[in-house]
Image: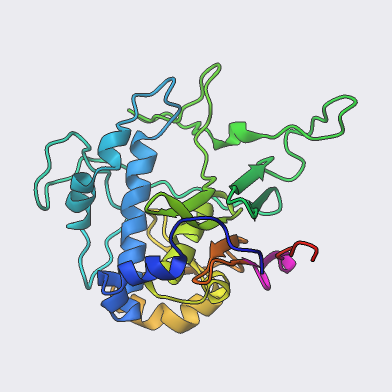
Amino acid sequence: MAPPSSGGSTVGEALNILEGSDLAALDRSEALHRYLEATALAFADRNRYVGDPAFVDVPLNELLSQEFADERACLIEPDAATKPVPPGSPDGAYAPCAAAVAGAASGGAAQAGSTSHLTTWDRWGNVVSYTLTIEQTGGSGIVVPNRGFLLNNELTDFNFTPTQGDPNLPAPGKRPRSSMSPTIVLDDGAPVLAIGSPGGSMIITTVAQTMLNRLDFGMPLLDAVAAPRASQRNTAAVSAEPAFIMTWGPGLENRGHIFTPVAEIGAVTAIERRDNGQLGAVAEPVRRGGGDAGVVLPEP
């Protein structure tokens, strides 16, 4: 364990705040149903509105507003899965169960072996969550002369089939949309959890589900990372690990979910600040051959 960081709240205190939250009180199958439906809605909105802000007017404040979230949440049926779903209208005029605008599904493929994530936290409270990628094995196939590293192939993150209003079409000087989601969770402004993962378009749901496991379901961090995963990116079928389908599939299939087996999803590393002020670091125990995690103590 690492020495205490200065100031701030702990994950334990954050869990106390979240006790009694809707998800924590629900049957696990119903809670996972809501998680899958919520991520489908989020991907519908992401794919319609998010692109390089230097080229696209992204309605970020509205997309992140509680009012827009409430309007979208009312589309989640407690006992029925409906996907793909159209994007919402982040226009500032919200009403319960307002109709959504027309749109299309876009899940994207997962990439393996080309993205890495590292998380670190020092004794002074400096926290880094860092995801790096070359997009696919070999990147662009170009090595920087006399430097020995590959250039990435991030251009594949653009959409190349034009659709009306698509914010992620290629253009000179434009940055493609990315799924990388390095995350630091704050409680009253102080970091309590740092987390991230590789996994292509499944990164977003991997990080979200691991935080759901830890913060809402109260799993120990290692269990939250190791738990079987599913990824719903606004497609007709849910990509899920076999252990997830075996454990939760029957209850979710009764709500209309369809599953496509995927051998593994993501490869998380995470660090949390614990109740006693010490740090706990964990990494995947099995996925991608297992990750590395450790805490370095100062010399006596």
Toward the right, the furthest residue is 146
- For residue 286, side relative to residue 178 (left or right): right
Q: Which of the two residues, 233 or 213, is positioned nearer the viewer here?
A: 213
Q: How many marks?
A: 0
**Residue extent of the magenta highlight:** 281-294
- For residue 134, side relative to residue 92 (left or right): right
**Is the N terminus in the top left, top right, bottom left or bottom right quadrant?**
bottom right
Q: Is residue 256 visible?
A: no
Residue 195: x percent and y percent?
Answer: 55, 56
Toward the front, the furthest residue is 300
Q: Residue 291 colored magenta?
A: yes
**Is the C terminus in the top left, top right, bottom left or bottom right quadrant?**
bottom right
Toward the top, the furthest residue is 172
Choose top left, top right, bottom left or bottom right for residue 143: top right
Task: Please tell me whether residue 196 is drawn above or below residue 81 in the rendered image.
Answer: above
Residue found 51% across the figure and 48% down from its top = 181
Task: Please tell me whether residue 291 is drawn above or below residue 46 in the rendered image.
Answer: below
Task: Please tell me whether residue 79 is drawn above or below residue 171 in the rendered image.
Answer: below
Residue 163: x percent and y percent?
Answer: 37, 31
Residue found 42% across the figure and 46% down from its top = 106
Residue found 24% across the figure and 69% down from its top = 80
Q: Is residue 210 visible?
A: yes
Residue found 48% across the figure and 55% down from its top = 7
Q: Which of the two residues, 280 or 144, is positioned nearer the viewer here?
A: 280
Residue 222: x percent and y percent?
Answer: 58, 73
- For residue 146, side relative to residue 231 (left or right): right
Residue 243: x percent and y percent?
Answer: 54, 79
